[in-house]
Amino acid sequence: LEIGKSYFVEIATIRAFKVLWANVLKTYACTTYPVYLNAHLVEDTYDKNEIYTNMIRATTQAMSAVIGGVDRLTLHPADRFKETNRTLTSRVARNVQHVLQLESHLDRVQDPAAGSYYVEQLTNQLIDAVWQKL
């Protein structure tokens, strides 16, 4: 999955995908195909001249992906488009993932967005819109 700039929409999209996948499996009476979601950030969200803006943007996008429930997240250095020394930005990209996992423990919560009225409603709207098209 690609994670874009829209924080709540990204969370709801990931959650909706998981529910829709479960519905498809249920429809075909399958139980042996669990979903494993791998996410990365959309390259268009990176600004080639604003490294610090990219770091902040990547952090919020990573958080939306983790709260949405991805299993694996790939963050690239904020200056990946420049021919520079990437020591700082590589470290920040790695540490964002560590903070979300090891310090926030968001990977241990089954559904961190559960109970949020806005996210729940947005998720349900996405599910209904997609399921009607199927």
Image (cartoon, grey):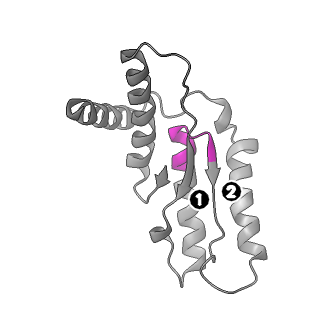
Residue 66 rendering spot, x and y as whole percentages: 57, 43
Q: Which residue is mark 2?
A: 96
Q: Nearer the viewer, residue 86 or 23?
A: 23
- Amino acid beneath label 1: Thr
Which residue sits at x=43%, y=52%? 7
Residue 37 falls in which quadrant of the image? top right
Q: Which residue is mark 1?
A: 59
Q: Is residue 71 magenta?
A: yes
Residue 59 rendering spot, x and y as whole percentages: 59, 59
Tag 2 and tag 1, C-beta contact below 8 Å: yes
- Amino acid beneath label 2: Val
- The secondary element bearing badge 2 is classed as helix
- The secondary element bearing badge 1 is classed as helix
Mark 2: few/some/many CA within 10 Å (<14, 14-19, 20+): some
Q: Is residue 120 above or below residue 93?
A: above
Number of numbered discs on residues: 2
| Stretch in magenta | 63-72
Which residue sits at x=20%, y=30%? 132
Residue 87 falls in which quadrant of the image? bottom right
Q: Main secondary structure of the magenta part?
A: helix
- Of the numbered discs 2 and 1, the one sitting upstream in the chain is 1
Say whether residue 36 is left or right of residue 15: right
* Residue 4, label in figure: none
Say whether residue 22 is left or right of residue 89: left
Q: Is residue 52 magenta?
A: no
Between the C-alphas of marks 2 and 1, the distance is 6 Å
Which residue sits at x=64%, y=65%? 76
Q: Is residue 58 above or below residue 19?
A: below
* Image quarter hosting the C terminus: top left
